[in-house]
Image (cartoon, rainbow, N blue to C red):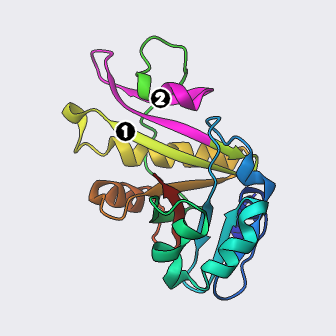
Amino acid sequence: MSGTGGLEKFLTEWLGEWPGTPGLTIVGSALRTQPGWDGSVREVVGVRTPDGGVLSVPPDLADAVRSGVRDWAEVDSRLPAALGRPDARAFAGVFRWSTEPAALPDAGEWVPITDPRVPLWLHPFGGDALIAFAENGAYAAGVGIKRHNAAGMEISVGTEEAYRGQGLAARLVAQAARWILAAGAVPIYLHDPANVASDRTALRAGFPDEGWKIIGVFG
């Protein structure tokens, strides 16, 4: 699966509807009441493009959100109250995808999550992790895969401080992206806009910033 068709399939299955018409489309979806990749329920998931996008909420909250949030400019200030969670906070991260990851050399090997060399932060991802080991056999960097659905998987990467600055993260992200594409899915990469290192890694790995945002609520 490649191109925007694969991305649209992922977004439809993840949010409950896509494409969004110009402006803000609010969708009431039972997906927001079901466990996600890690077993947690995420009440709000949105993807905003420069032209529009979809905000997915539980079906029983959809009418209240439509009444309380009229456009994307009001999401930050009005969404928490519309959800009945006035003390919560809406956030927007960078949403990236790639159908042509950078042709960087592989940096890691796929290792079962149960392998004692795999650090604890990768355990919640399940399955296999993509690990780069140092010459002495120590863990240097790794990727976990958030398996949102069969059409799209999200890449999370972390590098030990002693091994940063060597390009391991970008090589692992590109390697993982090729694996996801070979599995028939679209590789996704999300990060905080303030995270300069993640921005640099994404660009080097072939994940451009198209101005898309991932929307959520926490607190």
**Closer to us: 2 or 47:** 47
Inspect the image, locate mark 1, and give the three-letter code of the amino acid beneath it: Gly
Q: Quadrant of the N terminus?
A: bottom right
Identify the disc placed on residue 158: 1
Q: Relative to residue 197, is residue 9 drawn left or right?
A: right
Can I make out residue 184 in this image? no
Query: Residue 13 at x, y = what percent?
Result: 78, 57
Residue farthest top in this picture: 116
Residue 39 higher or lower than 183, as above or below: above
- Disc 2 + disc 1, Cβ < 8 Å: yes
129 vs 13: above or below: above
Secondary element at image label 1: strand
**Residue 149 forms part of the magenta stretch:** no
Three-letter residue code for mark 2: Leu
The residue where tag 2 is placed is 122
Name the side, left or right, on which 155 lies relative to 183. left
Query: Reading the chain from its start, which is encountered first: label 2 or label 1?
Result: 2
Q: Which residues are magenta?
A: 122-146
